[in-house]
Amino acid sequence: MLDIALKHGAEFRRCLLELDVRAMRMLWQYVHPELPQLMTDDEVLHAMHIARVQAKFTPEWLRAYSRRWLAERERRVMAAVGIAVKVPPSRRALGEELHGEMREAVLLSYREGVDLDLEAAEVKRRIMRARARVLRK
């Protein structure tokens, strides 16, 4: 089995450097059918970025890109913010305005680099401030 993997080393490298997810999935299935297969293209892409960061042959600019990609994915995946607004049906417009402003407060926090998970109290403070602004109108 080692022979077949060595024989396809150049293709593995090409797939990794070019992030050719489709070819990598087919190659992995062909070379290692006995090993677990990743289920989605997203899982394969994630694994490929990890491998690019660790591989010694990866040019530094590609390694840096993969580090940024992984950091953004971790940031995106690790936290979520739920917003619920309850108003009577007759005040639906107010509810939509409240929800919109509270949502914008969360998005602005994210864009400003506030960690939505670790700084949840700050995010909540911003949401409540946005809510109060709408209710004062």
Image: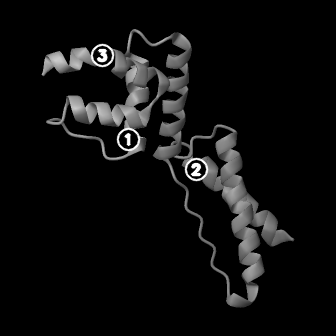
Residue 111 at what x, y percent from top left?
Answer: 68, 41
Do the residues bearing badges 1 and 2 touch, measured as CB atoms within 8 Å?
A: no
Q: Residues within 10 Å of mark 2 (few under 14, many from 20)?
A: few
Please, what is the three-letter code of the amino acid marked with disc 3?
Gly
Give the residue type that dot 1 points to: Glu
SS of the residue under disc 1: helix
Task: Give the mark, 3 or 2, whose residue is nearer the N terminus.
Answer: 3
Q: Amino acid at mark 2?
A: Ala
Q: CA distance from mark 3 to mark 2?
A: 49 Å
Nearest the eye: 58 or 132: 58
Q: Position of residue 116 (x, y in %)?
A: 56, 46
Q: Nearer the viewer, residue 90 or 124?
A: 90
The tag earlier along the polypeptide, 1 or 3, is 3
Given residues 122 and 34, the one toward you in this image is 34
Q: Which residue is mark 3?
A: 9
Residue 123: x and y in percent read: 62, 50
Give the residue pinned by disc 2. Answer: 121
Mark 1 — residue?
43
Say which quadrant the N terminus sits in.
Answer: top left
Residue at 49%, 18% (x, y): give it: 63
Q: What is the crowding at mark 3: few (fewer than 14 residues within 10 Å), some, or many (at least 20)?
A: few
Badge 1: few (under 14), some or many (20 or more) residues near its Cα, within 10 Å? few
Q: Residue at x 18, y 36 (%)?
A: 33
Figure disc tally: 3
Q: Residue 61 in the image: state x and y as whole percent.
A: 56, 14
Quarter of the rendering occupied by the C terminus? bottom right
33 displayed left or right of 58: left
Q: Is residue 133 left or right of residue 65?
A: right
Mark pair 1, 3: CA separation: 21 Å
Q: Nearer the viewer, mark 1 or mark 2?
A: 1
Q: Nearer the viewer, mark 3 or mark 2?
A: 3
- Say whether residue 71 is left or right of residue 103: left
